[in-house]
Amino acid sequence: MLQKLKKMMKKEKGFTLVELLAVIVILGVILAIAVPAIGNVISDSETKADEANIDLFISAARLAHVSGLVQQEYTVEDLVDAGYLDVKEGEISGTVKVTAATGTTGLKFDHVP
């Protein structure tokens, strides 16, 4: 019985150093490809979120303007105080300037950082 156990122990095999190094190299290559790709996705989503916030800011200024709060410039604070915009501190900044659109009878709303 003891000899049988010794034979089983001798048959026990593990990974060689070369196999472990190959796995580490493969994981390194995968990480080298994946990390920049994920970074680009995060950067793109932040840019799109900023653009959406600016569009929201301009829409709130338009709503305030047609509702009777007529100004040449709207700040975030003006629109929050009037109840047309609800944002977190520092999420949107700048002003929206209202100018006459050239060639039309409408108005042009531009975000100025």
Image: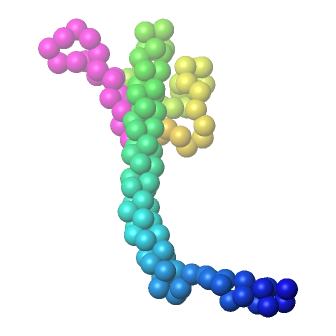
* Residue ID at (57%, 81%): 15
* Residue ID at (52%, 80%): 20
Pick the front one: 1 or 23:
1
Pick the front one: 13 or 30:
13
Residue 52 location, x and y as percent? 43, 32
- Quadrant of the frame with the N terminus: bottom right
Residue 5 location, x and y as percent? 79, 85
Left or right? Give the position of 26 relative to 85.
left
27 lies above or below 7: above
- Residue 11 in view here: yes
* Residue ID at (58%, 32%): 87
Left or right? Give the position of 79 relative to 95.
right
Quarter location, residue 57:
top left
Q: Which range of residues does the magenta coloring cover?
A: 96-113
Query: How many marks overall?
Result: 0
Pick the front one: 101 or 26:
26
* Residue ID at (45%, 78%): 22
Pick the front one: 99 or 111:
111
Quarter location, residue 95:
top left
89 lies above or below 37: above
Residue extending farthest right: 1
25 lies above or below 44: below
| Residue 29 highlighted magenta (yes or no) | no
| Residue 111 highlighted magenta (yes or no) | yes
Residue extending farthest left: 103
- Residue 50 in view here: no
Quarter location, residue 34:
bottom left
